[in-house]
Amino acid sequence: MIAPYLRKKQRVILLILFLFICTTAVISMGIGYSSLSYDRLIPVLFGEGTFKEQFVLFSIRLPRIAITLLAGMALAMSGAILQVVMRNDLADPGVVGINAGAGVAVAFFFLFIPIQATSFAYIIPFVAFLGALLTAIMIYILSYNKQTGLQPIRLVLIGIGFATAFSGLMVVLISGADRTKVDFIAKWLAGGIWGLDWAFVLALLPWLIVLVPFILYKAPRLNVLQFNDPVAIGIGVSLDRERLVLLLVAVALAASAVSVTGGIAFVGLMAPHIARALVGPRNELSLPVAMLMGGALLLLADTIGRNLVEPDGLPAGVLVSLIGAPYFVYLLWKKK
């Protein structure tokens, strides 16, 4: 049973995060290469703006805000699941190589498979999912030991190795590619938000609509998986089946996010840790907080990044990494 004061604390934190996201979104609507006066936002939202104002807000700003928010939520939920399933506080879809696997699949598909531009946004998440899934399976197999089970530190090290290897493979893939395609891959590697159209929002949204309620439903099972294997088995949990299902969900969320945002790491690492520090380890409490925290982190990083350097800005993935990399080192030091 969850203490009432924790429930109340969670609701307060969720409200604060929601207000923070709304504030950041409003700021993001107004600032940028083509600025939009804040006193014009409400009239433009209700269709009373000029053609330029309507175009900037509805075709550029709002899709980008929606994509960064949804992708941040997906990455945070994915990281929270991986940290429980793999029993490793350092697990993150970017750190353990899942994002890199998705990136190689997307790069290969983009470079070598001809496809209509109108279908691109909807097919890419599935391509990323397949690449991320194969990567996750290989990492899991290589990290598992029959005698001792899953090896957490070994998993992180193997994941980092996969991420490095896939980065090298990405360079090989783009070495002889067309310049415009190389620019796209380079932007993806840096964690730039490249899916900037409503089609990409519609491609990303169904994954969260289906998978987030499923994860929240599975929160009690995630609590059980945090115990060691004998305890979980004694309670009656089918470990292999639960881990497989949850791993598939985590991979699907991460792949759907990075397919439109590029290789963004550390959001899935930081958001669950911050959430657990605020409301405790119970997943019924921490998962919703982690989800909003991930959306807020990525939205804030993108809003700051795209206004730091003119005209293209700094990729959101770079800004998140500037914060996340030291935090990752701190967690490694803490686990010594």
Image (cartoon, rainbow, N blue to C red):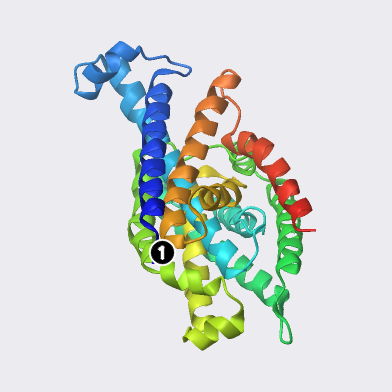
| Amino acid type, mark 1 | Ile
The answer to whether any part of residue 255 appears in the image is: no
The total of numbered circles placed on residues is 1
Assign the N terminus to one quadrant of the image.
Answer: bottom left
126 over 15 or under it: above or below: below
37 sits left or right of 330 in the view: left
Q: Position of residue 41 (x, y in %)?
A: 29, 18
The answer to whether any part of residue 288 appears in the image is: yes
Residue indicated by mark 1: 215
Q: Residue at x 61, y 59 (%)?
A: 98
Q: Position of residue 139 (x, y in %)?
A: 67, 69
284 sits left or right of 313 in the view: left
127 sits left or right of 207 in the view: right
114 over 16 or under it: above or below: below
Circle 1 Cα neighbour tier, 10 Å, few/some/many (<14 / 14–19 / ≥20): many
Q: Nearer the viewer, residue 127 or 256?
A: 256
Mark 1 lies on a secondary structure that is helix
